[in-house]
Amino acid sequence: MKKAPQFFLAAILALGTAGAGFAATADQVSRPVAANVNSSLEQRLYGEVHHQLALIPQFTIFDNLAYRVDGGTVTLYGQVRNAIIKDEAQSSIQHLEGVDRVINQIEILPASFNDDRIRRQVARAVFNDPRMANYAIQPVPPIHIIVKNGHVTLKGVVDNPMDKQLAVTRANSVPGVFSVQNNLQVERKG
């Protein structure tokens, strides 16, 4: 009985680590940095930029993308595991009507076998917990695990404050993790 969820999680992690096979969902791309939208052009661009970034096929739970629209200028932020995602993010935005300029400030995380191991183990620790299983059954879970030189940052959205704390506790339990930054947001329902 216990092997089915472990097999399912192993399949998700294998595909997520390879970076192929999962398109991002709308909730994975971080909401805009600037919340005030000045014009209908900016309002339209927020939605289109979000949509384009969510379609990047290599984007997984181990990457983070965010953006800001200021008139016809789109600034991209975040951390990704490889340059392909950074380049794809910029090229998918440049062709949008109304975009005059793209400033790409996406950080490419350093290649590290240890960080790759930590990513996999943190994902297992978080998503194998029975209380967090509802996040694991989504095509790409809404919790993103960003690892740089052994330091873990959790980003994304969870249902309640208890899940937010549990994710951090589980991530801290992984050997080799130096620190865990909790940037998870609690979804407001109602």
Image (cartoon, rainbow, N blue to C red):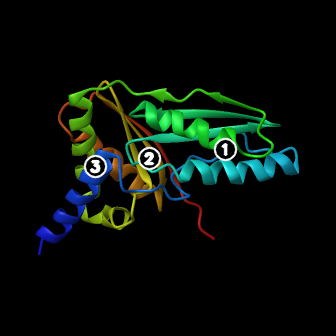
Q: Amino acid at mark 1?
A: Pro
Secondary structure at numbered mark 2: loop
Q: CA distance from mark 2 to mark 1?
A: 18 Å
Looking at marks 2 and 3 on the same chain, the residue that comes earlier in the sequence is marked by 2
Are discs 2 and 3 less than 8 Å apart at CB?
no
Residue 37 horizontal side relative to residue 172, left or right:
right
Name the one closer to the observer, 162 or 81.
81
Q: Within 10 Å of the Cα at label 3, are there few (<14), some (14-19), or many (20+) other Cα atoms?
A: many
Q: Residue at x 39, y 63 (%)?
A: 139
**Picture quarter containing residue 102?**
top right
Q: Which mark is residue 123?
A: 3
Secondary structure at numbered mark 3: helix
Looking at marks 1 and 3 on the same chain, the residue that comes earlier in the sequence is marked by 1
Secondary structure at numbered mark 1: loop
The x, y position of residue 23, in whole percent, is: 45, 56
Query: Can residue 33 be seen from the camera position used here?
Result: no
Q: Within 10 Å of the Cα at label 2, are there few (<14), some (14-19), or many (20+) other Cα atoms?
A: many
Q: Which mark is residue 32?
A: 1
Q: Judge whether 14 appears above or below 189 on screen.
A: above
Name the one closer to the observer, 8 or 118.
8
Q: Residue at x 48, y 41 (%)?
A: 64
The x, y position of residue 169, in whole percent, is: 30, 46
Query: Can residue 138 be seen from the camera position used here?
Result: yes
Q: Within 10 Å of the Cα at label 1, are there few (<14), some (14-19), or many (20+) other Cα atoms?
A: many
Q: Residue at x 74, y 44 (%)?
A: 35
The x, y position of residue 122, in whole percent, is: 26, 44
Residue beneath label 2, please? 59
Looking at marks 2 and 1 on the same chain, the residue that comes earlier in the sequence is marked by 1
Q: Residue at x 47, y 38 (%)?
A: 85
Residue 62 horizontal side relative to residue 73, left or right:
left
Q: CA distance from mark 1 to mark 3?
A: 25 Å
Quarter holding the N terminus is bottom left
